[in-house]
Every structure is written in structure tokens, then in C-alpha cells.
Amino acid sequence: MRCPFCANESSQVKDSRPAEDASAIRRRRQCEGCGARFTTFERIQLREVTVLKTGADGEDARREPFDRSKLDYAVRLACRKRDIAPESVDRLISGVQRQIETRGDSEVPSAVIGELVMEGLRQLDSVAYIRFASVYREFSEASDFEQFASTVRDVASE
């Protein structure tokens, strides 16, 4: 593992433990060159997945490899300043990734990923759900928020 501080390629594992609901291993490492400590995560990857991005005209515009860090960023942004345990967010992200990898398809439309995230956020926190939906569904007016929020209220009251 390359040191992020000095780029030395030799490091020693000081501690390992399960992370993210036992779907990853967290490792504390120490660089043998500069002595700096850093953390790495090791996750199971069931298959290589390509995301089919949808163009503005509704057609598939481009393909790119699935990137967990993009999913992580989007979900954490929606959950920002909410009283949600980081472990719950990690479980949601890992669950979405697992669903994507176990679908059996090597290519997954971005719309499928968005819907999986929305379903997970709907169960986790209604405000984070609305925040994510506002970007994902491209709300352009306040009425879009009002209309969507009314459907969330209906689900919450059931």
C-alpha cells in the first residue's frame, strides 16, 4: 500500500477490524519510510459494474465504472446536518452497492442506482430523502418540493 504522505510503497499493518456492518475491513497502517499512520478499507467486490449515464435527451450518453466514492458523497451530502448515525449511512451505501453487484448485470443504469438510494433514504430519514430527490429528480421550482413533500407525508402517516 502506497503511503499518501511520502509515496513509499512499503507499509505495515498495525491494526485490523471489521467495519461497515462487517462488509469491510478497516486497517491502520504505518509507513516504513516516513513513519506516518493512515487508514485503509478493504471491501469485497463481487463484479465489475459499469454505470450507464443517461443523456439530456433520455438516451444513454456514456458509460463509466461504478465508483463507490460518488455514491458515498451523494448520500452523505443528503444526510448532512441530520441526526443520522454514520454507521447507518455506511450500511445504506454498502447495501446499495451489494444490490448493484448482485443484480447479475455488468451494466446498471444510473436511474436504477438513484432509485435504490431513494428507497434507502426514504426508510432512513425523510429530510435526507427529499434533499436527494430534489437533485436526482431535478426540482426546478418550489412547487416541485411541495408536491414531492406531500407524497412523503402520505407515506409517513401510513
Image (cartoon, rainbow, N blue to C red):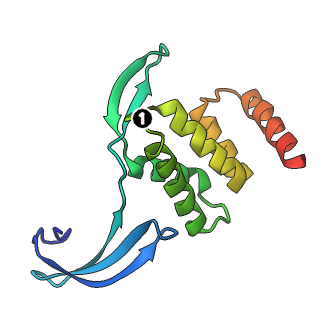
Q: Nearer the viewer, residue 60 or 81?
A: 60
Where in the figure is residue 40, as x and y percent of width and height?
31, 70
Residue depicted at 81% across the width and 36% down the height: 151
Q: Amino acid at mark 1?
A: Asp
Q: Tell whether 70 sits left or right of 130.
A: left
Residue drawn 55% across the image and 38% down it: 114
Q: Residue at x 42, y 28 (%)?
A: 53
Q: Residue furthest right?
A: 157
Q: In the displayed orientation, state which residue is furthest to the top.
A: 57
Residue displayed at 11% across by 75% down: 10
Along the viewing direction, whichever of 50 and 53 lies nearer the viewer? 50
Looking at this view, is 39 or 48 the one in front? Answer: 48
Please state which of residues 67 and 34 is positioned toward the viewer in this rendering: 67
Q: Which percent across, then down, holds residue 122?
A: 70, 48
Q: Is residue 107 left or right of residue 35?
A: right
Q: In the figure, is residue 116 to the left or right of 30?
A: right
Q: Which residue is mark 1?
A: 105
- The residue most toward the front is 104
Q: Would residue 41 appear left or right of 54 to someone viewing this image?
A: left
Instruction: Name above or below for residue 2 compared with residue 109.
Output: below
Q: Classify mark 1: helix, strand or loop.
A: loop
